[in-house]
Image (tube, rainbow, N blue to C red):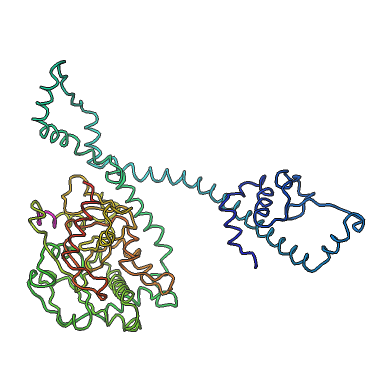
Amino acid sequence: PPIKDAEIMRVLNTYDLVVTPEHDLLARLLVKQMLYRVVSVRQILTPPDVGYARLDRFGFKRYDVEDKENVLPKPLLEYVNSRAFKVRFNRLNLLDQKLYDAANARLLRMWKEHQVVESYLAWRESVHDYVMPKLMNTQSLKAARELSQSSPRVAKVCPSGHEDDCSTVFEEHADEFLAEEKRRHASEQCMFENYGCFSRQLVNLGLLHYKRTRTAELASFFKQQETPESYGTAKAASCAGVAMVSEVRFCADNATLGDGVVGKAMTGLADSIYLLCARDACENLCVPKSWETKVRVVDGAKIDRCFGIQATENHFRRATLSHGAIVAHARQEKFRNVAVVEVDVNFVDPDPSNYPDYDAAKSVQSIAKLIDGNTAADSDDPFTIIRLGYRAWEFERGVVACPHGCGCRRGADGADDSYCVITRAQCDLRGSHAYILSGDSFNLFLEPVLSKKRTQTKVIDFNVFQRFPQQLVLEPMLAAQAGASNDADFIGVDQQFHDARLFAQSCVVR
């Protein structure tokens, strides 16, 4: 069978043989010995002569013999002149050429990595220049530095022989001592990895870097009409426009889409609200009264027809394109952020028995503050997406420990406990029934969603949301999914809230 490039590269990468020009020949000879038994052990153990004048292009020493008939045995000469030898010789030479090309490619990659190291040093300086000025103006860092410079508290020395008495006194006042220490060290959260002011500024820098680097790259993408590769934002936005429902009924907030009102109040903080329904659900829909000045009701079935998508197309793909059309329309309208709600949402206020200290007004106020100041330039906690509801997928599958990448930190600088922030991407939280998307993240959302390429098409809550770092997760969760297109994919509302509590217990870091 023919030798494939993948086979050659697999050997090279497995043994890391081709590393420098000095060892290039030996490495290729050794690979050949492993793949084909045509090189003697002596050739492997004894380095070939260095000097390309005495070697052919495949690394073998040249021999110039005038009287070949007398030097080589007759059977060997017959074999050399046979078709079988020529076929095998050509095949092995092809193998050597592939090894040679692979070695050169590896050396070129090493040179590029050397250049990367050089650029890393410049990048490190740019990070320092961006982060440090912002860091020095962070209130929590100032408090932490002042605390470190203050005189430390020193425990009284327990007299020898009175250890039991000292232990008794400490136990009596332990809670008081711990509370005092907690107050003294409250501002030191700024120093914590992945939680404090330094890591937040690094996340800010990453988001800012994304916006700057992708803006130019995606400029044509976001101006184009529909092409064979993409639906284009202009086409998507127009599809959302023609799918708007003209006649909308309004009901009391606690009488539609679930009886919860806290999540609806948070949703109403967005610049605009898009409520996604389909067919009969649009006709029977009643919208919360508090959304009246901001809401746009969008019929997903009309979006499908506008895109030319058949009803037989996968539901998840159709739903994803509906969300893409909505975000493209919000981008066209230049909204700073947008709330997207699916009609099968069920808003539920926190149960006082599970959350006795929950302050609804304070929670809404904290989200309002985040939305009003959400840019990488002026906020310690810029968000990409706020998840009012989600499906804790790993916990639905029986996971008991916090999955990798899902660590969720409480808000910075004494913010309330109504949300946490997942700073990393790739945390698998499913569900697209209620979220608020930052305007800075519209491009990140639309790039994969509007692609027509089968290898790149995405499902919104399977491999689109998972691309987002700095997701803000409401805890307790305020919205559940009341239905699903696939019964096998649906679990009850109570179970969703149960799994969300498991997520919080395992992943939220206070």
Task: Relative to 328, say whether 114 is above or below.
Answer: above
Task: Relative to 85, say whether 183 is above or below.
Answer: above
Q: Measuring 10% from the left and 72% from the top, which residue is drawn there? A: 289
- Range of residues picked out in magenta: 359-364
Q: Main secondary structure of the magenta part?
A: helix
Q: Could you say where residue 375 lies in the image, as x and y percent from the top left? A: 27, 55
In the rendered structure, the answer to whether residue 301 lies left or right of residue 43 reads: left
In the rendered structure, the answer to whether residue 180 lies left or right of residue 491 reads: left
Please tell me which residue lies in front, 146 or 30: 30
Q: Could you say where residue 299 lies in the image, as x and y percent from the top left? A: 24, 80
Instruction: Inspect the magenta stretch and tell me whether residue 363 lies in it.
Output: yes
Q: Measuring 11% from the left and 59% from the top, which residue is drawn there? A: 350
The answer to which image quadrant residue 453 occupies is bottom left
The answer to which image quadrant residue 390 occupies is bottom left
Instruction: Inspect the magenta stretch and tell me whether residue 59 lies in it.
Output: no
In the rendered structure, the answer to whether residue 141 lies left or right of residue 155 reads: right
Please tell me which residue lies in front, 410 or 155: 155
Q: Could you say where residue 484 lies in the image, as x and y percent from the top left? A: 23, 73
Task: Relative to 503, say whether 321 is above or below.
Answer: below
Q: Measuring 8% from the left and 52% from the top, which residue is drawn there? A: 356
Residue extending farthest to the top is: 160
The total number of labels drawn is 0
Which quarter of the rendered picture does the N terminus lie within? Answer: bottom right
In the rendered structure, the answer to whether residue 250 lies left or right of residue 136 reads: left
Please tell me which residue lies in front, 495 or 214: 495
Q: Measuring 19% from the left and 73% from the top, which residue is drawn there? A: 344
Q: Could you say where residue 171 lies in the image, as x and y percent from the top left? A: 11, 30
